[in-house]
Amino acid sequence: MSRKTTPELKGRAARLARLLPTGSARGQAARAPFVLLVVVLLGGGLIGLLVLNSALSEGSFQLDDLKQHTKELTDEEQALQRDIDAYSAPQALQRRARELGMVPGGDPAFLGPDGKVKGSPSPAPAAATPLVLAPEALTATSAGPSAATPSPYTEPSAPAVPASPTAAATPTPTTTDGR
């Protein structure tokens, strides 16, 4: 019984061995394009990851900038809202109205749906002196006391109120159905 150094293949393995190339130089030459392809794919993947990572970092910085800008705008909005609240407070409105020479109104009168006046109106009390000077008065005081110009402001007089509320000429509303 003699044994050979190369085992003999049988069946399916023998057919498979015939399909594959047998030379070692031929195997090296066939591997070169595959290795080159794998290296190119790995390099391309790494470069792609680098570009993706850079884009994500840039997006993160932009997001931080936008969040900071949003915070600044929110702070500004809150400051403006505080200013609006301060100016619309009743005490502030009353103070500004007095600075402009306004006075509280008198008793109001209302006009009913039938055209009759309800209530008895009264004029607003007159202000003793105006709190705001006219522009002409400001230029006169800056020029000196010798160039005093009279202010166009005059004390409001009481409006003429009719003796009877029905004496006022108010049209009576009519409807389309004849009532």
Image (spheres, helix red, strand yellow):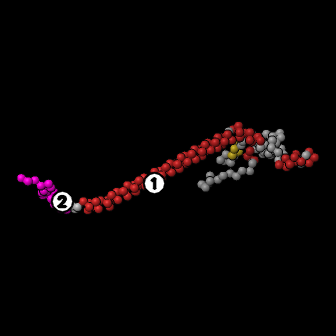
97 falls in the magenta region: no
Q: Is residue 110 left or right of residue 130?
A: left
Task: Report crowding for label 1: few under 14, some 14 to 19, many 20 or more residues within 10 A (C-alpha).
Answer: few
Can you see residue 81? Answer: no
Mark 1 or 2: the one toward you = 2
- The residue at which mark 1 appears reads as 51
Residue placed most toward the observer, 108 or 102: 102
Point 17% across, 62% down: residue: 18
x, y (%) of residue 139?
A: 86, 48
Q: Quadrant of residue 104?
A: top right
x, y (%) of residue 67?
A: 54, 46
Seen in the picture, residue 119 relative to 23 is either above or below; the reply is above
Extreme top residue here? 91
- The residue at which mark 2 appears reads as 17
Pick whichever of labels 1 and 2 is earlier in the sequence: 2
Point 8% across, 53% down: residue: 2
Give the magenta part as a residue range: 1-20
Q: CA distance from mark 1 to mark 2?
A: 45 Å
Q: Quadrant of residue 85?
A: top right
Point 32% across, 61% down: residue: 33
Amino acid on which disc 2 is placed: Ala
- Give yes or no for contact between labels 1 and 2 (Cβ–Cβ under 8 Å): no
x, y (%) of residue 30?
A: 28, 61
